Image: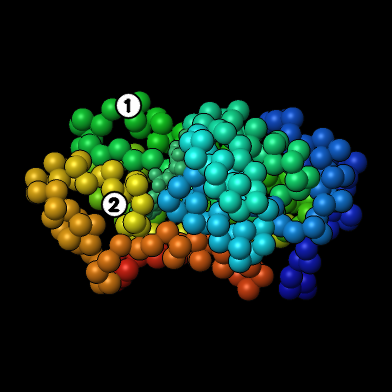
Amino acid sequence: MAFETPPRTIAEADVTNFASLSGDFNPLHTDEDFARARRNQESGRVAIVTGGARGIGRAIAEKLAKNVKCRVVVADLDEEGKGVAKSVGGYFVLADLAKPEDCRTVVRKTLKRFGTLDILVNNAGIQHIDPIENFPDEEWDRIMAVMLRAPFILTKSVWPIMKAKGRGRIVNVASVHGLVASPSKSAYVAAKHGLLGLTKVAALEGGSVGITVNAVCPAYVRTDLVAGQVRQQAKVHNIPEDEVLERVFLEKAAIRRLIEPEEVAAMVCYLCSEDASAITGSAIPIDVGWMAK
Ligand SMILES: NC(=O)c1ccc[n+]([C@@H]2O[C@H](COP(=O)([O-])OP(=O)(O)OC[C@H]3O[C@@H](n4cnc5c(N)ncnc54)[C@H](O)[C@@H]3O)[C@@H](O)[C@H]2O)c1
């Protein structure tokens, strides 16, 4: 009985049958891409970080570059991402991940620039707060497109390359709201629960081909996304804005503070390390004790 599947190298993979790995869904992966990935696989890992222009994504891009020595592709619709990419010696791709074609372009440009890829961090996210009866359909659709469909399309697009290399790391930045709910966040909570479902399916499919897929589930992190919620949360909970931190963001927190983006980035880096090669399909809370309550 075989107890483990040794990682495949690209040299061992069936290069002539690459089209069957990539499927018909996109034209990303030609035999030339595949040959380049094989040539480039020993020259340091390449990571795509979506939503890397600021907040958690920025911290992940910086830590992957510094601690894991990755060449990082920052994919974002905010041009600030260009400066982040430059500062980490990486590469910026302007992309609205609500658009499937932009997701595929991110992977295509990554392969064109670096010839290979090893890590995908699905981090880009948005928020809208309203009770269900007032929740605009178009906000629901956009949240689903950015936070659930984009990770699916990106996963699907990087998969053939990772599978051919026999190694790959995918980390989805979910949330405690992938595990539990809060009122007035129907689309966000549904998308994050869905992202954990995608994480589990991909982990099962990736287990035999050397790809691990995990999610991190932070509680409130000190970023613009949280700062931007203060007014809406005050309105929804009918409390003054200066009480939102204590009464909403830290309501369930045993450790009474916001999480720093670098703390989330550290866990992402760990999940991308060799030490984490037995961890897959996991949803790891970074939640200041929220789940213990
Ligand atoms: N901040 C928190 O408290 C918290 C907690 C748990 C999970 N998260 C998750 O962490 C991730 C990052 O959140 P953050 O707090 O750093 O947010 P942020 O608003 O600071 O950064 C989000 C980034 O995503 C980018 N982005 C948004 N829509 C995009 C699109 N359509 N195409 C490309 N890029 C797009 C933005 O431009 C920005 O750079 C999100 O998935 C969020 O749900 C955040």
Q: Residues within 10 Å of mark 2 (few under 14, many from 20)?
A: some
Residue under label 2:
181
Q: Residues within 10 Å of mark 1 (few under 14, many from 20)?
A: few
Question: x and y percent of residue 264 in the render?
Answer: 45, 62
Amino acid identity at mark 1: Asp
Quarter of the picture containing the N terminus is bottom right
Q: What's the amino acid at mark 2?
A: Ala
Residue 184 in view here: yes
Instruction: Quadrant for the C terminus, please.
Output: bottom left
- Residue 164 to residue 100: above or below: below
Disc 1 target residue? 137
Residue at 60% over, 28% down? 101
Q: Nearer the viewer, residue 37 or 201?
A: 37
Q: Is residue 183 visible?
A: no
Indicate which quadrant contains ligand 1: top left
In screen coordinates, is 76 left or right of 90? Answer: left
| Mark 2, secondary structure of its residue | loop
Q: Nearer the viewer, residue 66 or 171?
A: 66
* Residue 88 at x, y percent in the picture: 60, 53
Q: Earlier in the sequence, mark 1 or mark 2?
A: 1
In depth, the one of 9 and 225 nearer the eye is 225
Q: Is residue 156 left or right of residue 142?
A: right
- Separation of residues labelled 1 and 2 (CA atoms): 19 Å
Residue under the point 19% across and 42% down: 231
Would you place residue 190 above or below residue 273 in this image? above
Question: Which residue: 70% across, 30% down?
Answer: 26
* Left or right, residue 247 beside residue 166: left
